Image (tube, rainbow, N blue to C red):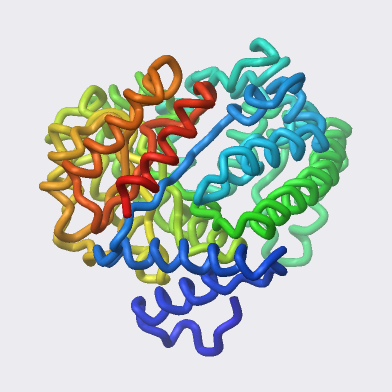
Amino acid sequence: MMVENWNKLSPEEKFEERFKSWMNPDITFASDKAKENYQQITQDWKDALALKNKRVRSLLNVGFYPAKYAEGITCEDIMYDYNKLGEAWKKFHFDFQPENIMSSFIIGSGKVLEILDYQLYQWPGQGVDKNSGYQTLEKEYVKGDEYDKLINDPSGFWMRHYMPRIFGSLKGWANMDPFTDILELPNVGAHMIPVGIPDVQESFKKYLEAGQEALNWISAVAEIDNEIVSQLGVPHIVQGISKAPFDSLGDTLRGTRPILLDIFRRPEKLQKAMDALVPLMIDMGVRSSTQNNNPFVFIPLHKGADGFLSREDFKKYYWPSLKAVMLGLIEEGLVPYLFVEGSYNERVDILNDPDLPSGKVFYLFDDTDMVKAKKALGERFCIAGNVSASMLNVGTPQKVEENVKRLIEDVGKEGFVLSHGVALDDANADNLKAMLEATRKYGQ
């Protein structure tokens, strides 16, 4: 997307330009029907954000399910064999005919992870069963007395402290000096001394090797995804990504228990660290969405649910920095797509913040009462949800159809997208097809 004088455009003008570009992608469709389908679906999404859609679209969010649906292919296979990744992904999309594509990017490359000796997760065939999903190995990768280092130089902290702890192959980077040491000629030689250390050089070799493999992987992903979009005429909804600053700290840096204790032990440091992360999270969302020509920025909310924080702590520690990220994205014409994980029944009203412009946020609910969500947000924002993943796994097509019908009746068509509650690693194929068919039947 190339627009002259971009920085002089208003947020609304940027919004319109991003949607125009997304709705008219640089892709050769396999047929006029596919092109027409793509443009109709994307127009319906734009209308839904403005609460003006006259039909309900469905939204799928799958994890490893395509591998389990395909015969003879494991979850491990699709992380290591990009041909099998394509086989599973195309079979799933062509058989189910969904109204959006879930990018094969989401699976990741097992080869890249192995080269880097990734310590933070286990994945299929590496620590968990070859047909299981990811498993996070939560630890205190950032210590409580390291907040100042993180606040003063986030990128430097990531490179010299955090990454050597989560990537075994990059341990040598802990010996590096900050790049900000290079100020004048005499500093150059001194700065390069650690780079000559064998451990540091070996870390850079592994980093380059992983980068080369990442190019192989992303080339395969692009080919797989482009074929699906071209043939079916369905858009990506999730390509840009960002995170809530509280989650950025709590998920994989401090850990759940430590960050909850930080609220009481070092609240000022916690606040300053989240403030330091806000511009980084805005930048991540803007870059990833712009690179992928997509107006939506996916933000999964991990630690804001009813069971994690009190309502007051949510209002004080979680919401302000998240709202700052959302406003920064909206300023750039983007749509924050919040995956509201868990239950928000006690705080769904807080999401209807008057500082957020109407029609510029999309909320996907997991376990929140959709009638409450509609009442709290439905006059200003598009919402989605929330067919039970357990029902899709062990229920019946009839029960799924009844659930879809009831959701659409309870929430209404305008400003509503029908989806399931969590990313699917497991499902009954007949039930999933029933969800899609029922949405078409009752959503007209």
Apparent side of residue 348 relative to residue 433 in the rendered image (left or right): left
Q: Residue at x 28, y 30 (%)?
A: 402
The N terminus sits in image quarter: bottom right
Q: Nearer the viewer, residue 241 or 277?
A: 241
Q: Nearer the viewer, residue 22 or 406?
A: 406
Q: Residue at x 63, y 27 (%)?
A: 166
Q: Residue at x 85, y 46 (%)?
A: 212
Figure check: 254 above or below 156: above
Apparent side of residue 336 relative to residue 157 in the rendered image (left or right): left
List x then y, in percent, for residue 343: 24, 29
Figure check: 116 above or below 339: above
Decide if residue 243 is in sight here: yes
Q: Quadrant of residue 148?
A: top left
Say how many tags the image has. Answer: 0
Q: Quadrant of residue 96?
A: top right
Decide if residue 200 is in sight here: no
Q: Nearer the viewer, residue 112 or 266?
A: 112
Q: Nearer the viewer, residue 274 or 46?
A: 46
Figure check: 282 above or below 138: below
